[in-house]
Image (spheres, rainbow, N blue to C red):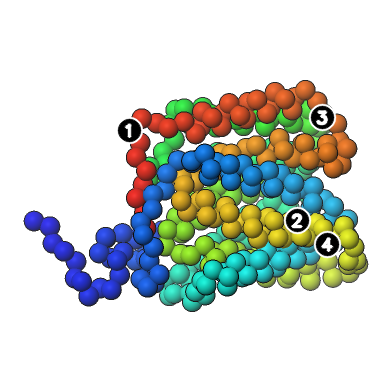
Amino acid sequence: MSTTPPADSGDPQNAAGTQNAAGTQSADSSRTAAPITRQPLTARAGALALLLSTLWAGNPVANKAGLDDAGPMRLGWLRFAIGGVVVLIYAVATRQSFKVLRHEWVPLALLGTLFTVQLAFMNIGQDFSTAGHAVVVTSTFPLWTGVFAHFFVPGDRMSRSRTLGTLVAYSGVIAVFYKGFADSSSDFLVGDLLLLGSAVLLGGRQVYLSQLGQGIAQHKLLISQAVFGVTAFVIASLIFESDEAFVVTTRLVVALLYTGVLIAGLGFIGQTWLLKRYLPSRVTVISLSQPIFGVLFSWWILGESVGGELYIGAALVVVGSALAQRKVGGQKPELIN
């Protein structure tokens, strides 16, 4: 016969025998929510994921505009500082607790470190590579998210249709940028390897966020990333950009409002909300559409030309994403708290 755990434990998670992603019992029983299911995307959740993907597609355009008036490190810490303020406002408005429990310190520190290293790889890699290479290599992160989720997230295994769909969608991304690869004659191996490392870390971070979100409030996850990111980029800026002029222009303000408020603030809030409630590989595969929207934004805002490869790539991304989102018979959503 089974036995019932002691009632005086004071923690509903202990009674259920579950643990959070850090391997410790779930925290703060006074704020325990009703069980929810982490499941494949619904139509509304998919629409939100697509909206966030569209917003993120404009991030490189805004960054490029901001870099005309600020160095990459300075632009980085300003962006995350603004994003952190947005998260703080959200947390205060929703009456969230800012108390960090003892078992939360280590996973939050690991998340912040992973976030900072991933961004460092991305920024340094872009200095050694081209923009076309950067977009294509970095946008492989949904593939890596699927791989990590297959091993670490119950109910999020890579089926044949999902693997095929993800590869088809990514082939659409490559189709959009094939000219950039074909016309490139320089050796970008170092930059591309760093960008690939960034994509792998980003894929892992998406899964880690999804797992931590089952036991740690999302505002704590986001604030830890902002704190680590701002600290690291401020130090780097003081070391490498202390002699550079800093001019506050309308263009810089608009770029910071976009990358800070919409992306590092509201965008991160929406993304962590999705990762908490839905299978991470299903959420991130929609991000394969980012390069497609990025090309459209470049054409619309910067006046860059759009060729027929965009239409081919867009069709492949749509078909591949549909295959990747197809429900596998017998698959049940994971019950979480």
Q: Name the residue under label 4.
A: 253
Residue denoted by label 1: 330
User: How many marks can you see?
Assistant: 4
Q: Residue at x 67, y 59 (%)?
A: 264
Q: Are marks 1 and 4 in contact (CB under 8 Å)?
A: no
Residue 121 appears in view: yes
- Give the percent coordinates (x, y) of residue 73: 77, 62
> What amino acid is labelled 3 in the image?
Val
Q: Do the residues labelled 4 and 3 touch (CB within 8 Å)?
A: no
Q: Which residue is drawn at 48% across and 65% down?
A: 217
Q: Badge 3, how many Cα within 10 Å: few under 14, some, many 20+?
A: some
Which comes sooner in the sequence, label 1 or label 4? 4
> Which labelled disc corresponds to residue 258?
2
Q: Of callouts 4 and 3, which one flags the residue occurring earlier in the amino acid sequence?
A: 4
In the rendered view, tell whether residue 263 sits above or below residue 112.
above
Q: Name the residue under label 3.
A: 306
Task: Tell me the element at label 3.
Answer: loop
Earlier in the chain: of badge 2 and badge 1, it is: 2
